[in-house]
Amino acid sequence: MARKCQFAKEDRRKKLVEKYKKIREELKSKGDYEGLQKLPKNSSPVRLHNRCQVTGRARGFHRKFGISRLVLREKALRGEIPGLKKASW
């Protein structure tokens, strides 16, 4: 499980991205890149990172399910994800 501070940091970044979204679009359309640099770093959507909802793992994230590959495998083997099963041939 990821530390709670990592979840909190991601939430703060999401709020900043939403807050400065309009301003960033206006500055980009004008071509004012100096103005963009004066905005907070975490207001850029590039700095957001997907995290597993169960464990908080940042790597091996599956967008379709919102969980990491490890949790996905466990849930698939237990049959908790409908229509998903381990391949065998």
Image (cartoon, helix red, strand yellow):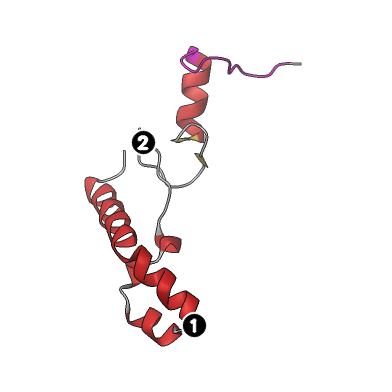
User: Three-letter amino acid code at disc 1?
Assistant: Gly
Quick one: which residue is furthest to the top in this view?
79
Q: Position of residue 46 (x, y in %)?
A: 45, 62
Q: Residue at x 49, y 28 (%)?
A: 72
Label 1 – label 2 distance at C-alpha: 37 Å
Picture quadrant of residue 53: top left
Residue 62 magenta: no
User: In this rendering, is residue 59 above or below 79?
Assistant: below
According to the picture, the residue beneath numbered tag 1 turns out to be: 31
Quick one: which residue is furthest to the bottom in this view?
34
Pointers 1 and 2 in contact (C-beta within 8 Å): no
Drawn side of residue 71 relative to residue 18, left or right: right
Q: Secondary structure at mark 2?
A: loop
Picture quadrant of residue 45: bottom left
Q: Position of residue 25 (x, y in %)?
A: 43, 69
User: In this rendering, is residue 79 above or below 19?
Assistant: above
Q: Nearer the viewer, residue 55 or 31?
A: 31
According to the picture, the residue beneath numbered tag 2 turns out to be: 53
User: Three-letter amino acid code at disc 2?
Assistant: Gln
Split into 4 quadrants, where in the image is the C terminus? top right
Split into 4 quadrants, where in the image is the N terminus? top left
Which stretch is magenta?
A: 78-88
User: In this rendering, is residue 51 above or below 55?
Assistant: below
Drawn side of residue 73 relative to residue 21, left or right: right
Q: Residues within 10 Å of mark 1 (few under 14, many from 20)?
A: few
Q: Position of residue 66 (x, y in %)?
A: 45, 35
Q: Residues within 10 Å of mark 2 (few under 14, many from 20)?
A: some
Marks 1, 2: nearer the viewer:
1
